[in-house]
Image (tube, rainbow, N blue to C red):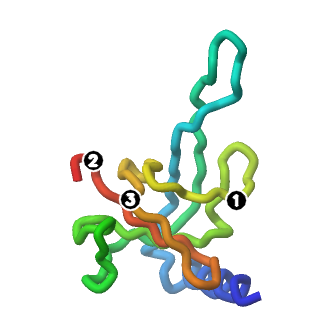
Amino acid sequence: MIRDKVQSKVAKAFDTKLADAVTPFTGEREESGEYVPGQGTNPVTVRYSGRGVFGSFKAEELAPHIEATDTKLTALQNEVTLDSDGSPATPQVDDIIAGQTVKSVRQDPASATWTLALRKSGG
């Protein structure tokens, strides 16, 4: 119930007050596919998409796995969906979003938003 209310309010802000800052994004990762006898498993690319606000982390948000140069992506959980079937998607560490590697995946206490730390290659 709280999650629905938070998601509704954030979605409204994404559509109005934050509309200029909201950006669509896509993410992907490779997973092992089905086992084929005599061949093993073939990798499968999992793709998902959503929309969110890209920004920076505040000094108090930095941690051993989050650096000052990382990009902060805040996205509504109910809008991050698998491209294959539209079901909910959960970003994971080492996924690639907007050409950057996911280094941290957190959710708020109401499980309404994802906060991701993205790092450019070589960082």
Q: Nearer the viewer, mark 3 or mark 1?
A: 3
Q: Which residue is mark 2?
A: 121
Q: Which residue is mark 1?
A: 88
For the residues labelled 3 and 2, the Cα–Cα distance comes to 11 Å
Above or below, 96 relative to 69: above
Image point (32%, 77%), residue name: 57
Q: Earlier in the sequence, mark 3 or mark 1?
A: 1
Number of numbered discs visible in the structure rendering: 3
Above or below, 21 relative to 60: above
Q: Secondary structure at mark 3?
A: strand
Q: Is residue 59 left or right of residue 83?
A: left
Question: Dot 3: few (<14), some (14–19), or many (≥20) neighbours within 10 Å?
Answer: some
User: In the rendering, at what x and y percent does residue 40 appear?
Assistant: 63, 19
At label 3, the amino acid type is Lys
Image point (29%, 86%), residue name: 60
Q: Is residue 120 left or right of residue 106?
A: left
Q: Earlier in the sequence, mark 2 or mark 1?
A: 1
In which quadrant is the N terminus drawn? bottom right
Q: Which residue is mark 3?
A: 103
At label 1, the amino acid type is Pro
Q: Earlier in the sequence, mark 3 or mark 2?
A: 3
Q: Quadrant of residue 88?
A: bottom right
